[in-house]
Image: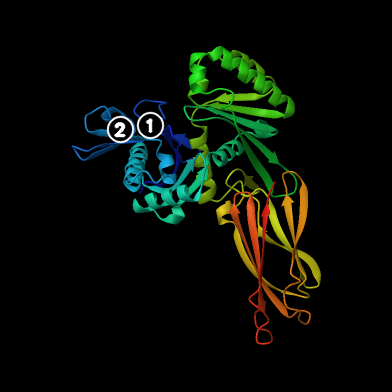
Amino acid sequence: MAKEIILGIDFSRDYSQLSYLDDTGKPKSVSIGTENNYLIPTAVCFNSELKEWSAGDEAINKSHSENSRLIKELPLLFNEDTEENVGKIMTVFFAYLLKLAVNQCNGRLIKNILVTVEEVNQNVLKGIKEVLTDLGYQKDDIRVISHSESFVYYTLNQNKDIWINKVLFLELNEYEFACRRLEVVRGREPHVADVKVEDLSNLFDLEMAKKDIHSCDRILADYMDELLKKHVVSGIYLSGAGFYLDGWQKTLQTICRNRRVFKGNNLIVKGAAYGAKECFLPPTLDKYLISCKGRTRVKITMAVEYKGKDSNITLSNIGDYWYDATSKMECIMEKPTKAVFEIQDLINHSNDTFKIDLRDFPEREPNTTRIEVDFRYVEENKFEITIKDLGFGDFFESSGMTVTREVTLQ
């Protein structure tokens, strides 16, 4: 029986792409129609007269017929209430992608799927998993990550001389002009791979670049010159239709000095395949925590005493998806006067301590107050801790009292 494949999907607003792990464990992009054509229009078409659905290039072609409706920018539909047929639209499109992948791989079955999107939220995560489970895949065989994470996975699988210092990823397409900046913070394990994203649409957009590439070239060269004075950068990736325009001479002269520069449109989808490798096969990057938008950027601990020694219990670690970063614990307090917590910022090498006042809890004998500590993020940069008095078995009933503290991260 042919070996099953592990598939990476870049599900973007303009184009989607496919990549799978070959027999050597390296990502291989899926060409569509002709060699080196990796871009699949993220679009679905419905012909109301024929009751016919189509996807990708076929959808674009058939959209010119009468009674046809073209639906584009599909990832946005997960966050909107204006489209009634979201489930059907997504099923048509993902079924089309999976068929392309199977055909490219000579009929080999797909075992695991990792989908990368511009930004992960609960709606996107839930929607993609529902679509793929409806298509017959198990939830444990599905992962959804952000483009920033794909960038990390791709970069860390390259030669270390590329990411020995910071790495930049510039994307200029129809919907986005952004710069992702990766810094690998090494020291005591685990290491931290931190990605920050800067929106550059205030400089110019793709349409401006098409009309006046020379002005945009000067603007970007000046911006990069200032950026590279502030940061030591060893590698730069350029992606998107904008960087395939002719006329970036000044920018290239600026960024190519003493650093590696690459151009290509399939970095993110290859990063998805590398990410799938980490998720579904024995990991090789388990010494690294990924910190980026959508993931927690700090470690939260609570001070406790264990076996007569001061210690800390982790409530949330760096690199967790913020909407999954929840924990609940119980402990017995010697005196219910305060609970002490610490915010550890491993990237900026800083620690902040805060306390929650418990003096309104009932006074009891030492070590006869049991509390429940409930931790959760309410937003990406805001968490909440609720402490509840549980009493002490048959000796003291719970007072039912709770204290809640909300903390906003800077």
- Spatial CA span between label 2 and label 1: 8 Å
Nearest to the observer: residue 208 or residue 224: 208
Nearest to the observer: residue 342 or residue 245: 342
Give the vertical position of 104 relative to 88 (above or below): above
How many residues crowd around disc 1 within 10 Å: few (fewer than 14), some, or many (20 or more)? many
Q: Is residue 130 left or right of residue 226?
A: left
Residue at 49% of width from left, 47% of height from top? 144
Residue 114 shows in the view? yes
Q: Which residue is mark 2?
A: 59
Give the vertical position of 400 relative to 302 (above or below): below
**Label 2 residue SS:** helix
Disc ID at residue 41 = 1
Residue 107 shows in the view? no
Residue 139 is situated, as x and y percent measured from the top left of the image, at: 43, 55
Q: Is residue 367 left or right of residue 114?
A: right
CB contact under 8 Å: marks 2 and 1: yes
Residue at 49% of width from left, 42% of height from top? 116
**Label 1 residue SS:** strand
Residue 91 is situated, as x and y percent measured from the top left of the image, at: 33, 46
Residue 149 is situated, as x and y percent measured from the top left of the image, at: 56, 42
